Image (spheres, helix red, strand yellow):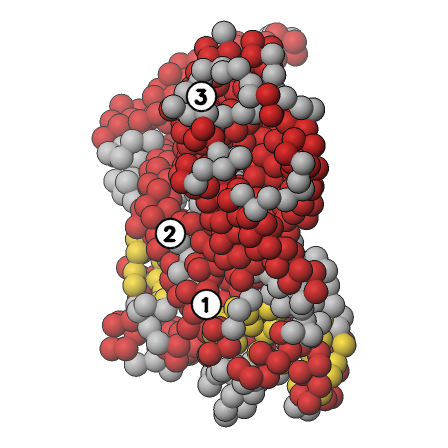
Amino acid sequence: MHKFLFQITVFIYFVSTVGFLVHIITLRKDAERIATGFLFAGFGFHTAAFLMRWFAGGHPPLVNLHDSLSFTAWAMVGSFIMFQWCCKLKSLGAFVVPFAMIIMTASSFQSTEILPLPPVLKSIWLPIHAIICLFADAIFALAFCIAIMFLLQERQIKKKRLGAVFKRLPSLETLDAMNKRCLTVGFPLLTLGIVTGSIWAEKAWGSYWSWDPKETWSLITWFVYAALFHQRLTVGWRGRKAAIMTIVGFAVLIFTFLGVSLLFSGAHSYATWLK
Amino acid sequence: MPLGLNRPQIVLLGVNHNTAPLEVRERLSLCESDTPALKLFAGLSSCTEVVFLSTCNRVEVLVSTNCMDEVKESIKELWMDRGKMDFKILQDSLYEYEGMFAVRHLFRVASSLDSMVVGEPQILGQLKDAYRVASEANTAGMVLNRLLHKAFSVAKKIRTETRIASHAVSISYAAVELAKKIFGDLSGKNGMLIGAGEMAELAAQHLMASGAGKLVVANRTLSRAVKLAGSLGGSAISLEEVEDALIDADIVISSTGAPGIVLSKDRVKRIMRPRRHRLLFFIDIAVPRDIDPRVNDIDNVYLYDIDDLKGVIEFNKAEREKEAFKADRMVEAEVIKFMAWLESLNAVPVIQHLQKKAEAVRQREISRSQKVLESLNDEQQKALDILTRSIVQKILHDPIVCIKKGAQEKNNKMILDATCRLFGIDGLEETPKLQDKDLPDDSQDKTIS
């Protein structure tokens, strides 16, 4: 059942993606409305799929790569909807929704088998730690999209070539403000994710920090974002530099998320559970 | 039978920015003559109605007349005489439109399709002013009234139904559009003027109208700065204080007459840290430039000089030209409608004569039977009068409808000739003057002013 719901979700997200892309190309208002409608529906199905899977497996479905990718996409779409609700950003959907769609596609290629949970993961900290971390990832993915939009728009204005992109993207300052907002939400979440992970590690393995690759790279990611956060607050870094830094941070984050899991073996590695 | 030529003809003579240099346009505007130009044209005997349009880019005389060639000659003579124009120069730069070509040209001018900057909004206002002057001076009659009103409604329609006006095409407008793309909302953003040129003033006005917050004016002569700041609602500083003031400014418009660079890259770079790297937008409309072009290389600083802004405008212009095609199609449709109406004016004298003749017949026949009718009492006489009247009307009704309809068509001469022959109407030489109430009505396309 949850597999079927998941497939429906992917399909609805696909329709929504097409809608948002049509909107940004033709600037038709009805395309955006339809796309947003589908996105809401997709989000509903996605939530249902998540709960069904939890129910079917008897543990939070946040264990393998399929789960985490799917949950990240869910969190992205959720935050996007909340974002658009509080401060609408023109054309953001055309960047975020396709991205979520790609993550969902990647997720659907992963094994969807529900394996019995290894005893070490059986803890209340599993959902707490995983949800916080994945939410942080989703927020940073959003920030990444906004940073890309900023750089596109900035380039147009700096080079004085004001083409079709210029018309379709929001103003620089709006984009920068949104980037900052993402950072102020994402960075505390990331910090909290690392702290909860550390507490859980102490409970499970008896040590707060054991320098396994996932932990090390998480720390590196944290430092990148911390640097950006610090510079923004103290020196007033903004604009291009902040956008580039956001993209660098996200690249490191992706590596932490995927690269480490697939390349190294360690306590966090999904490789052990993947065949 | 001079029937076909009876309706008023529309003639338009003029020059614009493409056909004549500024000097010629100035002369033709007859601004140095002590009598207003409109009055001079209205004084021409061959000219029934006239509207005179003179803007910085064009001078045009729009005339409704019954003798086309004569009016053209006398207008040219008047220009040569009063404007001290050489015939050859005048002939070379002048365009002459008649009939539907004149109508089309006027519609295109009103819709800003003939403007130097296609889609610019001022021309419609200027045309309305010209028309107001003409109607106050009573030189615009029913043909030009209708033509001008039609022109205004066409212009309005084109403005709302095409995107011809949706792209910024003036320097100050483009600057504000850009500022909006950088800052989003301009409220709370501070403006700054360096130098107090006229262009800068215009751009600053635009900026303030778009909701910008404080404004600071810096100028070499402080008194001028104070004056300008007063009129724009800002504060004045001297040139030496610019660097400090830049810390608070967001949008800087520079237009000093200084021969060299006023603001170097280093100075701008220095203020970025105290600004906490807030975005800074420079608009340099001075020639030669005031701001070091390399300022644009600094992060979070955007510098547009006059050529860059022109580039923006060029791009927008190209967009506009696409829309202009659509607009031209709309103009064409309206020209055809107007010409149909104008053609139908030919029918007016014929119908009038027809009615007059029928009435004369009725009167004559009644008076012939006077003797017999005398015995009737008042009430009966009245009834008889009504009876005869309505017989005449009923008989004439179908022919009149047919004439009116036929007159809307291009070759209406045939039906008018036939009418004259059938009813034995001639002697149209002393045509009664056209009155508004005689006009064929087509209330379904009522015009607005």
Q: Residue at x 23, y 30 (%)?
A: B414
Q: Give percent across and percent down for residue B133.
A: 57, 60
Residue A236 falls in which quadrant of the image? Answer: bottom right
The first of marks 2 and 1 along the sequence is: 1
Q: Look at discs 3 and 2 and give the one toward the viewer.
A: 3
Residue corresponding to mark 2: B319
Res. B19 visible in picture: yes
Nearer to the camera, B440 or B219 = B219
Residue corresponding to mark 3: A10
Q: Residue at x 53, y 51 (%)?
A: A249
Q: How far apart, in angstroms, are the residues tagged by discs 3 and 1?
A: 46 Å
Labels 3, 1: one chain: no
Near mark 2 (Cα within 10 A), the count class, few <14, some 14-19 or many ≥20, is some
Labels 3, 2: one chain: no
Q: Give percent across and percent down for residue A202.
A: 68, 36
Q: Look at discs 3 and 1 and give the one toward the viewer.
A: 3
Q: Give percent across and percent down for residue B286.
A: 51, 81
**SS category of the residue bearing label 1:** helix
Nearer to the camera, B404 or B444 = B444
Res. B432 visible in picture: no
Q: Amino acid at mark 3?
A: Val
Residue B309: give its label. 1
Near mark 3 (Cα within 10 A), the count class, few <14, some 14-19 or many ≥20, is many
Near mark 1 (Cα within 10 A), the count class, few <14, some 14-19 or many ≥20, is many
Q: Amino acid at mark 2?
A: Glu
**SS category of the residue bearing label 3:** helix
The quadrant in which the N terminus of chain B is found is top left
Q: Residue at x 49, y 15 (%)?
A: A114
Chain of the residue that carries numbered disc 1 in the rendered image: B
Q: Residue at x 49, y 54 (%)?
A: A248
